[in-house]
Image: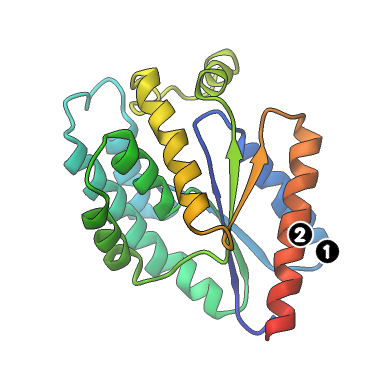
Amino acid sequence: MATGVFITLEGPDGSGKSSQMRLLVEFLSQKGYQVFATREPGGTRISDQVRQVLLNRMENQEMHPRTETLLFCASRAQLVEEIIRPRLQRGEIVISDRYADSTLAYQGYGHQRELQPLVELLNYTTGGLSPDLTLLLDVDPQTGLSRRRDGGEEWNRLDAYALAFHQRVRQGYFEMSRQQPHRWCTIDASLSMDAVQDAMRVAVLERLQLLVNRA
């Protein structure tokens, strides 16, 4: 592959992105692709420090939405320049658990903030780097949050927001996928793990083949 391929996983909390990403990376690696997995916020030494500030539910409850937005963007800017862009330039497939669309979904639609300033900020943050494919793992927010509680997963500061916030996030994802259908692929994350993984593999392989044909 002459140039890398950038794939992102998005979705409400509890949609199973992290578990599914591990399976997808293993599948692609077995097929001979050079794959690198990362996550947001985090992924670098600096970004992981920002993650601790962002997600600490006990210490940072007073965080303002603008502060939250800028911290996510700071973490992302470091990840793009230190990890994602260099690996793409080496021809690798990079898969990220969350990316810039999460900021529009959570800090934009969730907090009900004006979107256009966020779009401009994200363009600056990422240097204009957009995914080749975004997989939206969709699940009802109440179901997703219950999964996180029952599964004993990390319950962070954003998880603790009201259900109405998470419902707005989900609707934000729907709106973004409607606006850019060529980039987004929505998958029903309420299905079994195997069914979700199968759908993800089909979508990724189709996109990889499309990009090869265009090269």
Tell me the tag on residue 180. Answer: none
Q: Amino acid at mark 1?
A: Lys
Q: In the rendered view, does 204 fall on the left or right side of 117?
A: right
Q: Nearer the viewer, residue 212 or 152?
A: 212
- The quarter of the picture where the C terminus appears is bottom right
Q: Is residue 112 above or below residue 76?
A: above
* Secondary structure state at the residue bearing disc 2: helix
- The quarter of the picture where the N terminus appears is bottom right
Q: Nearer the viewer, residue 178 or 57?
A: 178
Q: Is residue 211 above or below residue 15?
A: below
* Secondary structure state at the residue bearing disc 1: loop
Callout 1: 10 Å neighbours few (<14), some, many (20+)?
Answer: few
Q: Residue at x 31, y 66 (%)?
A: 123
Where on the picture, by quarter, is residue 32? bottom right
Q: Residue at x 40, y 54 (%)?
A: 100
Q: On the image, numbered disc 1 is attached to which residue?
A: 31
Q: Amino acid at mark 2?
A: Leu
Tell me the tag on residue 28. Answer: 2
Q: Residue at x 73, y 56 (%)?
A: 203
What percent of the width, then of the height, locates residue 148?
54, 21
Q: Do the numbered discs 1 and 2 sit on residues whose CB atoms are within 8 Å?
A: yes
Q: How is the image coloured?
A: rainbow
